[in-house]
Image: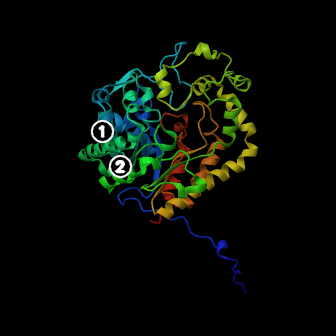
Amino acid sequence: MTETPRYLGSGTTENDTSSLTGAPPAHLPQRLTITLWDFSWYTRAEESGPYADLDAACAQAAKLGYNTIRICAAPLLLFGDLGLENLAADLDIEGLGSSPDGGFYGRGTRWYDVPGGYSVNLRARLHELFDAAARHGLVVILASWEYQQSTVFARSAQWFDAIDAVPLKNRYRVLTDAWDRLIDALTAAGHRDRIAMVELHNEVDFSILPALADGGSEELRRLRQLHPDLLVTASYGKPPHLAMHTLPDGFGAAQFHVYSYGVLDALQKKIDIRSEGTSDFPNAALSALLRPNAPTVVEYGRLRDWKYRATVVTDQMLYGYDWIDPEAWDTWLAKEYGPYREVMHREIDSRVIAIAAWARWKNIPAVVGEGWIGYTPLNGTFEEGPIGRDLAEGGIKTALEQGVWGMVLCSNAAPHHPLWSDEAWQQRMNSSILAAPAGR
């Protein structure tokens, strides 16, 4: 005879958390499989570049199992009423500029590896992207990276100067007004149902913006009132996982990012790569990881000054990532990873759980729009390899178990990263996400 298990308290009873934390609009997919195209969809549109053909890029995304692309829609440039109309119609993409050795700055980095050399009508290109997305059954998350780095890729400082001139206290209001006009333009073009979500700005905690509580939450509510049928929110790069109740009100969705730097953080601190103005840079630890032909910092030179003000990336990061030996970088991380493995897995799991629990409390959809390790050199393979895939798969599993509506496979799973060529893994993971019951 089977005995009934003894009751040991409510804390021992498992609750089913797999249903969605909040219901998304009914016309949107039951799960979002997200590929992060950020600003690269217009900064990497050079001839033979990953986004030269938007239709082909959308077709490949759909083939790999993605149903959502997340972009910087540059609302301030296109609809900010900042006197940038002519620039938006003929935006000269330079990248970070030419380096003394005949190459270009940022060529060893992710996201900043922009050769430039072309101009784009960005308003027309936004409509082209939505047309291509419609042909391939994709929806679009709209965000802005303009107060983080989008402007740095332009040849002219005009875009940066215009948004930088907006007083800090007014920036959320100007963003809201720009989004309202951009949404109206997409609606007039027949693409309103193609909008999966609107983010007031990407990573408001790591952008040149006030804290969201200082005027941002009011603007979130205003934009939601203007467009009550759309999901409107703002994303955080590092939400307060241990104190989610301190977040301000106004979110229409919990679109937060989950990075566990762990062993990567240990390496970054050891080589002092994220600082700026360090007197003895590069230190001995970084010098040991550089390629033999690396120039000195002085020989490599600097970007134009305004470009450093237009981005949150430092001069030491650009030099380091441009001249790091990716194999030496990966070898160090793999060798030192062991003691960090468990804590990185636990950190990812606990952060996903915290985000999902908060979203369930607020009855709003949860999305992990970026993850899972952190910023690595363009040709490094630590995150794309077995270790990174293991961490990503663990994060995705936990996200599905906690009722998260949408997620990236990895921030590096996009056309402008080498991981895009790993078709089998992306198809397998996206299939597992789409097959998970949503329980709306």
Rendered residue at 49%/21% (across/down): 305
Q: What amino acid type should be assigned to the residue bearing mark 1?
A: His
Left or right side of 167 for 11: right
Query: Is residue 267 visible from the viewing direction of this image?
Result: yes
Position in image of residue 282 (x %, y %) = 68, 22
**In x, y percent, where is residue 137?**
36, 48
Q: Residue 179, image x and y in percent?
A: 33, 44
Left or right relative to 139: residue 270: right
Against 336, residue 311 (above or below) is: above
Checking the image for residue 4, the label placed there is none
Q: Where is residue 193 in the image (x, y as percent from the top left)?
A: 31, 52
Crowdedness near tag 1: few (<14), some (14–19) or many (≥20) residues, C-alpha within 10 Å:
some
304 or 377: nearer the viewer:
304
Find out whether the residues at labels 2 and 1 contact each other: C-beta distance under 8 Å: no
Residue 343, above or below 127: below
Is 330 left or right of 141, judged from the image as shown?
Answer: right
Colour option used: rainbow
Q: Residue, x 35% and y 36% (percent of image)?
A: 76
- Tag shown at residue 127: 1
Q: What SS does tag 1 mark?
A: helix
Q: Mark 2 points at which residue?
A: 195
